[in-house]
Amino acid sequence: MARVESFELDHNAVQAPYVRIAGTEKNQESIIQKIDLRFLQPNQGALPTAAVHTLEHLLAINMRDHLPGIIDISPMGCRTGFYCIKWGESTPEEIAQALEKTLKQVMETEVVPAITAKECGNYRDHSLFSAKEYVREVLEKGISRDPFERVGI
């Protein structure tokens, strides 16, 4: 059976919100990083689907301005955060700073991009209000650079 890194993480020991390097894949030509952008404490809360969907759109567009090499940002199935896949290596500090800048942009956003039937597969399921409420909570708590300790805030 294949090893899945995120299933080996002790979800009871982490302290959200945080950023975490969840994996690094290297070959002779390239490096790809998988990053855990955790907003909520696992097993204690979950982002509503409309907030997740809106945040997915806003993170996908805005975070690329602050962190080079992003391939994709996708919601976690547990709805406690997002995975970011990117080319190259970034430090937790660089990632946290980029996420903080992006979340501050979310708080100033008035229109969610790409929410027409042509652009989005579930265009009716968005809530900017709800997304901002969860972003406010993350920014108030601060984004830790370590998943097991509240550091770098």
Image: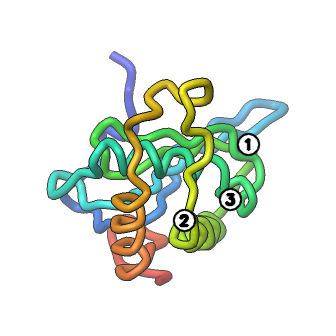
Left or right: 112 as drawn, with respect to 46 = right
- Dividing the picture into quadrants, the one containing residue 6 is top left
Query: Mark 2: which amino acid?
Result: Val
Between the C-alphas of marks 1 and 3, the distance is 9 Å
Left or right: 27 as drawn, with respect to 39 = right
- Dividing the picture into quadrants, the one containing residue 92 is bottom right
Q: Secondary structure at mark 2?
A: helix
- How packed mark 2 is, by other alpha carbons closer than 10 Å (few <14, some 14-19, many 20 or more), is many
Nearer-the-camera pick, 107 or 71: 107
Q: Secondary structure at mark 3?
A: loop
At a point 38% along the width and 20% down the height, the residue shown is 2
Residue marked by disc 3? 90
Residue marked by disc 2? 106
**Residue contact between numbered discs 1 and 3, judged by CB atoms under 8 Å:** no
Q: Is residue 96 visible?
A: no
- How packed mark 3 is, by other alpha carbons closer than 10 Å (few <14, some 14-19, many 20 or more), is some
In the picture as drawn, the residue positioned furthest to the top comes out as 1
Residue marked by disc 1? 87
Query: Mark 1: which amino acid?
Result: Trp
